[in-house]
Image (tube, rainbow, N blue to C red):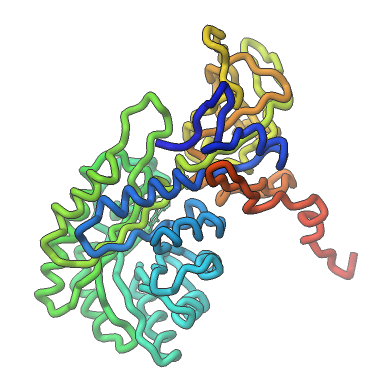
């Protein structure tokens, strides 16, 4: 459920007509709904009620500080994967003891930054990384809390580019080597081994792969405890999928996911962490764009819009489907027609949808890409020298620009010319 509905024929973000925002900030832009962000966060929080837990928003999905602060004020922690994300979370007011640091390639500098600024735990992905964390912790005269990410070798049954829990993926250490690696970690004086981490992939639409992975985590917890490790925290990653179309089968709900966690792991008495990104932010955001031209091609009509693959890369990168809706609701009885919806970038891959049924549209009309709140703005680039598009946050009947559109000068003046030219 989200808060982007038609009212009197006008698509609204909560109580604000999307067209009003377009008039104020120009197109294209991203708009997020506070109520939807909070609703999704609370669904997870409530699903884990009765168990000591922390929901850490995977901020790679949407990292604007206004979004982070909205969630942090509701009690969320953050899952970060780079120094930039760590510093952004801190800048948004998230305390270090609510930030977990994931990722396969943490550098010594990143580790130093997080360890001196405060960190809940590092989710360690390899033995060489473990050695570096140990060395940095000793250098700072402290001990680093760590979990070790294990790769459970389960098939997440999702797009190959976002599956992470198979043995051929680069993530974690093979579960078969866990005892050995935990013993190694326990021998390093700069580390405090507190738990286990697992994340098997993103946009999972079934519970079975989670169940398979969490059962392996439960067994491993018992094994490691028997080997003398004080396993007291389980970080279960993110990955619960969202409905990208209103027609397809609905993925499992957070409450069902929470019940599965309690069922498979509850008896262990561990503190539970989860790292959802997409489910919190995905359906809390739209990308709004304007039709520049309607072009009749051979046997097909193109809607050429002012948003492009650099603004929303998911269709080009993963063949992802996003529902696209007109900002003015079509009158009942208006017949739809198929369009290829494309951006202005000079690549055929700059195609958002082929033969998509839409009401008849004309130059100047606004359209909205649904489910664009996660992995949208954060994956955008300035390809074709197109400035990053603004982000807007709605709260009831108010809206605020939370990242403004840079000027062309700002974009161009970042380049510097060597003196020999
Ligand atoms: N934790 C870890 C360690 C992760 O690698 C990820 C996502 C998450 C949590 C959050 O997963 P979520 O709940 O959002 O599924 N750009 C792709 C998605 C990449 C996901 C990468 N890791 C897309 O647009 O579909």
The percent position of residue 42, horizontal first and vertical second, equals: 35, 51
Name which quarter of the figure residue 226 lies in. Answer: bottom left
The percent position of residue 13, horizontal first and vertical second, equals: 54, 37
Q: Left or right of 63: which side holds 384?
A: right
Q: Residue at x 15, y 59 (%)?
A: 266
Residue 140 visible: yes
Q: Where does the C terminus fall, quadrant-wise?
A: bottom right
Q: Residue at x 72, y 44 (%)?
A: 384
Residue 345 visible: no
Compared with 205, 276 (above or below) is below
Q: Left or right of 198: which side holds 360?
A: right
Q: Residue at x 63, y 43 (%)?
A: 310
The percent position of residue 282, horizontal first and vertical second, equals: 46, 43
Q: Is 270 or 395 nearer to us in this picture?
A: 395
Compared with 224, 166 (above or below) is above
Compared with 348, 381 (above or below) is below
């Amino acid at each position: 459920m989200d808060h982007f509905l038609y009212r009197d024929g006008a698509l609204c973000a909560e109580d604000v007509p999307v067209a009003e925002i377009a008039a104020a900030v120009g197109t294209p832009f991203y708009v997020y709904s506070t109520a939807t962000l909070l609703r999704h966060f609370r669904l997870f929080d409530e699903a884990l009620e009765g168990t000591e837990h922390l929901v850490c928003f995977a901020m790679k999905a949407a990292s604007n500080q206004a979004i982070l602060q909205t969630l942090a004020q509701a009690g969320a922690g953050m899952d970060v994967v780079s120094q930039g994300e760590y510093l952004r979370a801190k800048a948004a007011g998230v305390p270090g003891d609510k930030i977990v640091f994931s990722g396969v390639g943490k550098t010594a500098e990143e580790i130093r930054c997080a360890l001196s600024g405060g960190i809940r735990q590092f989710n360690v992905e390899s033995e060489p990384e473990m050695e570096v964390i140990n060395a940095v912790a000793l250098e700072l005269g402290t001990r680093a809390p760590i979990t070790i990410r294990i790769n459970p070798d389960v098939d997440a049954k999702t797009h190959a580019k976002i599956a992470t829990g198979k043995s051929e993926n680069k993530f974690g250490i093979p579960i078969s080597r866990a005892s050995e690696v935990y013993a190694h970690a326990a021998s390093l004086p700069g580390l405090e081994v507190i738990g286990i981490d697992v994340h098997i992939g993103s946009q999972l639409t079934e519970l079975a792969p989670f169940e398979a992975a969490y059962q392996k985590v439960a067994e491993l917890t018992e094994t490691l405890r028997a080997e003398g490790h004080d396993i007291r925290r389980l970080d279960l990653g993110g990955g619960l999928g969202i409905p990208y179309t209103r027609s397809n089968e609905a993925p499992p709900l957070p409450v069902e996911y929470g019940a599965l966690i309690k069922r498979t792991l509850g008896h262990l008495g561990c503190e539970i962490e989860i790292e959802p990104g997409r489910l919190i932010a995905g359906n809390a955001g739209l990308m709004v764009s304007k039709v520049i031209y309607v072009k009749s091609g051979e046997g097909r009509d193109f809607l050429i819009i002012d948003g492009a693959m650099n603004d929303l890369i998911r269709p080009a990168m993963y063949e992802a489907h996003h529902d696209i809706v007109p900002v003015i609701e079509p009158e009942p009885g208006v017949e739809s027609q198929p369009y290829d919806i494309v951006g202005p970038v000079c690549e055929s891959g700059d195609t958002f949808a082929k033969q998509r049924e839409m009401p008849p549209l004309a130059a100047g009309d606004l359209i909205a890409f649904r489910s664009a709140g996660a992995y949208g703005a954060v994956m955008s680039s300035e390809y074709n020298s197109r400035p990053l598009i603004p982000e807007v946050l709605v709260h009831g009947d108010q809206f605020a620009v939370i990242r403004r559109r840079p000027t062309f000068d700002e974009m161009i003046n970042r380049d510097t010319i060597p003196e020999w030219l």
